[in-house]
Structures are given as C-alpha cells and as structure tokens.
Amino acid sequence: MTAISHSTPTTAERPIISVRDLRVLFRTPGGKDPIRAVDGVDFDVQPGETLGIIGESGSGKTSLGRALVSLITPDSGQILHDGLDPTTLRGARFRAHRRDYQIIFQDPSAALDPRMTVLDSVAEPLAIVRAADDAARRREALAMLARVGLPRDLAERYPHQLSGGQKQRVNIARALMLRPKVIVCDEVVAALDVSLRGEILNLFADLQRAFGLTYIFITHDIAVVSHISDRIAVIYLGKLMELGAADAVMGEPLHPYTQALLSAEPLALPAALRPKRRIMLEGEVPNPAAPPSGCRFRTRCPVARPRCASEAPLWREVTPGHSVACHFAEVAGRPQRDAILSTSMQK
Ligand SMILES: Nc1ncnc2c1ncn2[C@@H]1O[C@H](COP(=O)(O)OP(=O)(O)OP(=O)(O)O)[C@@H](O)[C@H]1O
Ligand code: SF4
Ligand SMILES: [Mg+2]
C-alpha cells in the first residue's frame, strides 16, 4: 500500500461529531451486570478528517460506531452532530438528519439485497427519500457507479455475480447517494483480499477529497489504520486509552496497550516507526461486564504498579493534541520503555 498524505484539519472549526462521557451498555438474559461495551468516552471529530479507531476484538469499536450514527441509543452521555443532539429530533426531521451520518460494514454482501440489481440497490436510497424521478435516480446511480470505479455493464448484475471488492464498491456508492457528511467505516476492508485493500483504501481517500467527507475508520488492522488516519484513537474494554495524531500515536505511543498492539505487528508500520522489541500481552481480555478496578488494562499491563489497581487513570492531554489514560504515560513512553520493561517496577 502506498501511504496517503494526511491533511491535518484545523482545530478551529466546530467538531462535526462531539462525544462526551458516552456509555453503551448491553443487558443479556441471566447476566448479573450489563456488558459495558462503551464506558465513558470523550472525543471530537473535525470536519474532513479521518479518525481511526483501533482495538482488539470486543473492545467496543462497533458499538461506538453504531452509536455515532444513531443506530444505537446511548445509555448515557452525549453525541452532538455538528452541534445538534440527534436524540432531540423526531420523525421526518430525525430521518433527514440521519442521512448525513452513514455507516458501511465489513461484510459487503450483507448490506445488499440479493434480489436487486446493482443499479437498483444504488438508486434505492434516493427512492426511499423520494428524491427525483425514476430516470433521474438511475442517471445519478450510474454516475456514482462510475465514480467508485465500476464499469457500466455491472449495473444490471445481481450481488452474487460480483467479487468482494466490487460489492464493497457498490456499498460505497450506495452510502454516497444521499451525500452524507460523515461515514463510519467498520472494518470495511477486512473481508477483502490483501491485494485489494490498498485499492479500496485509496478509493476512500479519493472520495473523501471529492465529497469533503469525514471518516471514522474502525479496524483492528494496524496497517489499515496507519495508512488512512489523520488521528488515531485506541480503545480497550470500552474506554479510550490513547488519542492523538497518527504519526505521534504510531511513532511515540504513550500507552502500554498501544505499545503492545504496535509491537505485535511491527511490519505493518513504516520502517522508521517499527518498535524495536515485542511486548507480549499476557492473559485474556477481562469480562466487559466486570472490568478490573482502577486501570482496566492493569491485568495485562507489563508495567502495572500498585496504584493502578486502586485508582483509575484520568484521561489527560500529555502533549498538545495527544491524550492518554495512564498514570505513568510520561515514563512509559517509547524512549524509556525498554528500560522500564527490564526493570522490576515498584510504586
Ligand atoms: N447486541 C449485543 N448484545 C450483547 N452484547 C453485545 C452486543 N453487541 C456487542 N456486545 C458486546 O459488547 C462488547 C463490544 O462489542 P463490539 O462489537 O462493539 O466490539 P468490537 O470492538 O467491534 O469487536 P470486533 O473487533 O470483534 O468487531 C463485546 O463484549 C460484545 O460481546
Ligand atoms: S495506569 Fe498502570 S496499568 Fe494502566 S496502563 Fe498505565 S501503567 Fe499500565
Ligand atoms: Mg466490530
């Protein structure tokens, strides 16, 4: 994959998404405590940027992404869309608002109706909102198919007659038909052959420039997140561990969890950013219905100290634009990390 040049957005603009103390809980039959899928998360997304969200399976990425586009109602906290709280909207106003905030999922087949042709699938969002007449909708759909790089003769095919990459292009075209402002991309290249991923990521970047889109790019793949993101957020057991500019998070990760994630896949990073040694994460991800006391990463943290069990680390900005939740972020940062890991740590 060739690296995409990152355009760092100005912070002076009003965030297009603003998240404050967000919680998404799931109650399961027989479960004593709810699953804390998203458990107190704060961040802003600026117009035109790509925010990558990375974390292991079950860390809450999809739950967060679905809440961001109003597919899940949060249990508490707030999400503002361009300053507006979508939960205050009803009926037609809510539906109209939701068009601006779309989501594309991992499985390109699941989102497409197997009985509809590609052209009908792509034109359908306009039909649902009764925009334009049938002929105009078809014209727009054909233009969008061309825009996402699909040849004209695919328009009359059915989903089972397409490759995975072609299906994902159809999904992208469909999501763009209502001219959204924000697209949450949830593992959108994970189901694709590795050789195709760079191509589809480049298409996303190209469409972002053409349509002025803002992306939330959810993935567990370090190569993908480093390729496409302006900023990166790292999530563990429903909480943000670190958030900062992509180069800073990849090059000088402050949180031991980020360091461990990056060290597990050194070849995913450009040579200059590759960690020198592997940090092994011990143990399983704890039960999200009963996360550990204090710092929820402490049961797997290679540099945990007694304080980590009794006191939850504050979410704090350590350098401008680079926030972290670790009591010892300053000493756990990359330059000192190797020394720390070879030293027995006491408070
Ligand atoms: N509908 C649901 N009902 C109950 N629990 C759920 C539901 N959806 C998600 N969860 C739980 O919430 C937690 C977060 O799940 P989520 O799907 O958000 O994680 P994820 O980071 O997207 O994982 P993956 O990388 O595997 O897609 C997990 O413990 C999951 O089992
Ligand atoms: S607060 Fe403690 S347990 Fe948590 S990441 Fe930092 S050092 Fe590790
Ligand atoms: Mg997921």
Image: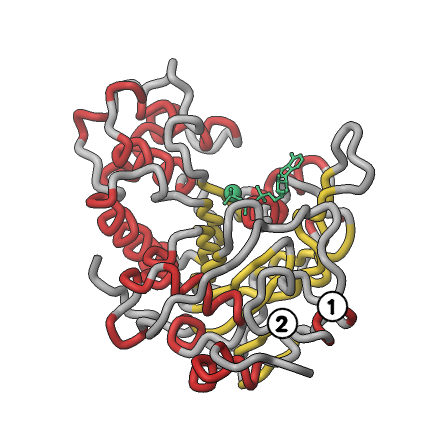
Q: Position of residue 324 (x, y in %)?
A: 59, 74
**Quadrant (top left/top right/bottom left/bottom right) for the C terminus:** bottom right
| Of the pair 289 and 19, the residue shown nearer to us | 289
- Nearer-the-camera pick, 147 or 271: 271
Measured as percent of width and height from the top left, residue 39 is found at 70, 55
Tell me if I can see residue 89 in this picture: no
Q: Is residue 101 above or below residue 309?
A: above
User: Which residue: 53% across, 48% down?
Assistant: 100
The amino acid type, in three-letter code, at marker 2 is Ala
**For this view, does 31 lie left or right of residue 327?**
right
Q: Is residue 28 left or right of residue 210?
A: right
Q: Which residue is mark 1?
A: 309
Q: Are marks 1 and 2 in contact (CB under 8 Å)?
A: yes
Q: Earlier in the sequence, mark 1 or mark 2?
A: 2
Colour convention = secondary structure
Q: CA distance from mark 1 to mark 2?
A: 8 Å
Specify the label residue 304 is tagged with: 2
Position above or below: 245 against 36: below
Residue 190, percent from left and from top: 36, 42
In which quarter of the view is residue 188 placed? top left
Q: In the rendered image, which quarter contains the N terminus?
A: bottom left
Q: Position of residue 98 (x, y in %)?
A: 59, 43
Left or right: where 33 falls relative to 241: right
Crowding at dot 2, Cα within 10 Å, few <14 / some 14-19 / many 20+, comes out as many
